[in-house]
Amino acid sequence: MGRRGEIALDPRLSMIARMVGSCACCADIGCDHGRLGAFLLQTGQCKALQMTDISGPSLDKARALMDNLDMADRVRFSVGDGLLALEGTPDVIVIAGMGGATIAQILENGREKLGRVRLVLQPNVAAPQLRRTLCALDYAVTDEQVVQDGRRCYVVIQAEPGKADYSPKQLTVGPVLLERMPRALEPYAAFRLRVARKALAGALASEDDSQQAPLEREIAIWEEVWTCLQR
């Protein structure tokens, strides 16, 4: 908390907030402590919020924060499973800090709640699976950013309704990141290479043939990206 109750965000949440932009109503799915939503209200980026969490005690933390900041009257709190907890349709939906497979499942289960909503997603892992699911739900990736927070790198994805069909390389790296090749992609590419090479070594040691080819393809993609970034 900053001075006079002002909310200060870490680099990861700051990037998510920037990608949310300005809107009438934002929904934070799995809001946990509620700091992102509090920041969006304090800065005037959003006029109203929907905050949901599958855990009642977790949602109580967000409710307590909003009470302390005298902003609870601008928030609709709901306990429930993903998008199914939403009441009404927001302009932007944020789902952050979960695995890509979990976010994908939330979107699939709540697809009837999506409408024309803009999505801001931050998967901790399995970003390629999440991008594949977005395509299946008729969503296209319109922006992607890599942000470094301490020793970790995070990818934040914005998606909007639209048709998209991505190549394996676009699914792995991200269509927007692949097009822009930002300098921030360099540490993330190095991280993905380390993870994939370690996984391949494990697959070779255990003679798991089913994993070797996919991991070799992933490594080849990230090696190509890494080489391009060094030019």
Image (tube, rainbow, N blue to C red):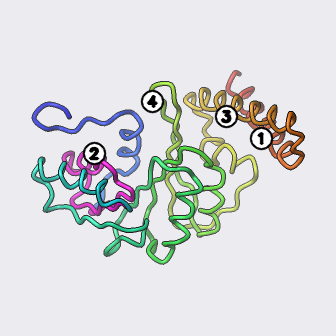
Residue at screen point 50% across, 45% down:
156
Q: Element type at marker 3?
A: helix
Crowding around mark 2 (Cα neighbors within 10 Å: few <14, some 14 to 19, many 20+) is some
Q: CA distance from mark 1 to mark 3?
A: 9 Å
Q: Nearer the viewer, residue 64 or 229?
A: 64
**Type of amino acid at the residue the image marks with label 1:** Glu
Which of pointers 1 and 3 lies earlier in the amino acid sequence? 3
Contact (Cβ within 8 Å) of mark 4 with mark 3: no
Contact (Cβ within 8 Å) of mark 1 with mark 2: no
Crowding around mark 3 (Cα neighbors within 10 Å: few <14, some 14 to 19, many 20+) is some
Read off the magenta span.
24-53
Whole-percent x, y for residue 176 in the image: 60, 46
The quarter of the picture where the C terminus appears is top right
Mark 3 sits on what residue? 192
Q: CA distance from mark 4 to mark 3?
A: 16 Å
Which of pointers 4 and 3 lies earlier in the amino acid sequence? 4
Contact (Cβ within 8 Å) of mark 4 with mark 1: no
Q: CA distance from mark 4 to mark 1?
A: 24 Å
Please give left or right for residue 100 compared with residue 117 in the image. right
Q: Nearer the viewer, residue 95 or 90?
A: 95
Residue 213 lies in the magenta-colored region: no
Whole-percent x, y for residue 214 in the image: 82, 46
Q: Quadrant of residue 4?
A: top left
**Type of amino acid at the residue the image marks with label 4:** Asp
Mark 4 sits on what residue? 149
Mark 2 sits on what residue? 35
